[in-house]
Image (cartoon, rainbow, N blue to C red):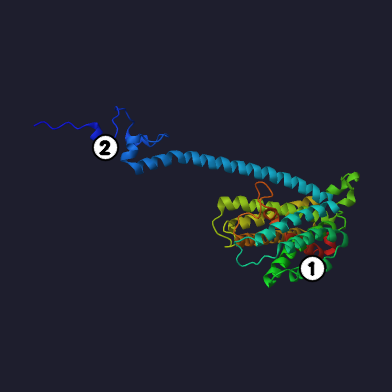
Amino acid sequence: MAAPAVSHLHSPFLLIPSPPRPHPPLHLRFLLPSPPPLGLRRRFPLLAAAAISTGGGGKEEAARKAEKARQLQKRVLVGVAIGVGAGGVVVAGGWVFATAVAAAVLAGSREYFELVRSTASGGVTPPPRYVSRVCSAICAVMPILTLYYGRMDVTVTFSAFVIAISLLLQRGNPRFAQLTSSVFGLFYCGYLPSFWVKLRSGLAAPALNTRIAYSWPILLGGQPHWTVGLVATLIAISSIIAADTSAFLCGRAFGRTPLTNISPKKTLEGALAGLGGCVLTTVLLSTVLRWPRSLLSATAYGILIFLGSLFGDLVESLIKRDAGVKDSGSLIPGHGGILDRVDSYVFTGALCYSFVRVALPLYGV
């Protein structure tokens, strides 16, 4: 007896009859950018899903690389603009430099209290908002007072007293943790950055051996404009930039050994490269600017600059880790917040000023 004919409508594999069409070999179908045919997707769903994901992975990877390239370009352009502007501010000195430091301090203190107020900061008790505003205002005034009055001990004492009174007068139950977070913000965001003003404007001894000073235009201050404070500040800022750049590039290329658990991305190889770049920049600039005169003093100055920048970077990483955020803010395009850019400078100014005043005789001239 002949076998009964099977209708396409009752076939267990073909739900809808369709005319046959040629297909590429199975081992070549997964190389095509288009998804596999409908019949293949129904019979082999796992293989079809793998083929689709493989075809779209290249586009996603290309999109990610393009986005990284755009972010890097934006970061470089913004960084160059900030560097040029900062260089002009440092050379200008006086109230221009103090005002720029005050603006950075105000923005940084606001970011600091937002980090403290973050919901992820479980071990930190933030102060009331009006107390944080008072503290930010005091921090912004400190660089100006440092420029015109020099001494900061009275300013810091009075500021701590004002913050303590503000906390005691708040409604509710004041807590000691609120006082500690506020006073640390005063120290971290206001007191330490003010040493850059003392370094730039407080060391007024002329750098007599500086070559550039001989040809400096009289309209811009002439030779007396190039003081020890100006030369020391330029060397410090340039060395910090060299340290950060060297550590970033070498850390990405050769970094294998973690430096600390506070910042997992920092490596020992990157730190050593940053130390070398910082000391090398300090020595080269000291040769050009003829300050300090001793190679040993220039090397020690570079090592101190690197230690201050590294410690400041780690402290800011610790604050961000407790806050549970990657960046301190979004003020600077491609760079994050103001604290992300100035963290290496917070402690360095105080160390540089102390080194020049105490360790180098006659202001290092």
Decide if residue 193 is on the left or right side of residue 248. Answer: right
Q: Is residue 216 above or below residue 318?
A: above
Query: Mark 1 or 2 closer to N-term?
Result: 2
Q: Is residue 158 visible?
A: yes
Image quarter in which the N terminus is found: top left
**Of residues 151 and 253, which is closer to you in this image?**
151
The disc placed on residue 13 is 2
Give the residue type that dot 1 points to: Val
Relative vertical location of residue 169 with respect to residue 271 in this rendering, above or below: below
- Residue 300 percent coordinates (x, y): 73, 61
Using the numbered discs, state the Cα–Cα distance from disc 1 to disc 2 in whole angstroms.
82 Å
Nearer to me, 177 or 54: 177
In the image shown, does 24 or 299 lie closer to the viewer? 24
Looking at the figure, which quarter contains the C terminus? bottom right
Q: Is residue 339 left or right of residue 96?
A: left
User: What residue does disc 1 label?
Assistant: 162
| Residue 194 falls left or right of residue 256 | right
- In the image, farthest residue toward the right: 218
Is residue 280 shown to the viewer in this render? no
Residue 135 vertical position relative to residue 235 in the rendered view, above or below: below
Residue pictured at 90% horizontal, 44% vertical: 219
Q: Amino acid at mark 2?
A: Phe
Classify mark 1: residues with Cα within 10 Å, few (<14), some (14-19) or many (20+).
some
Q: Name the element at disc 2.
A: loop
Residue 122 picture quarter: bottom right
State which quadrant residue 78 falls in: top right
Residue 30: horizontal and vertical position, in percent?
Answer: 38, 37
Q: Residue 332 location in percent, x, y?
A: 69, 48
| Picture quadrant where residue 107 is located | bottom right
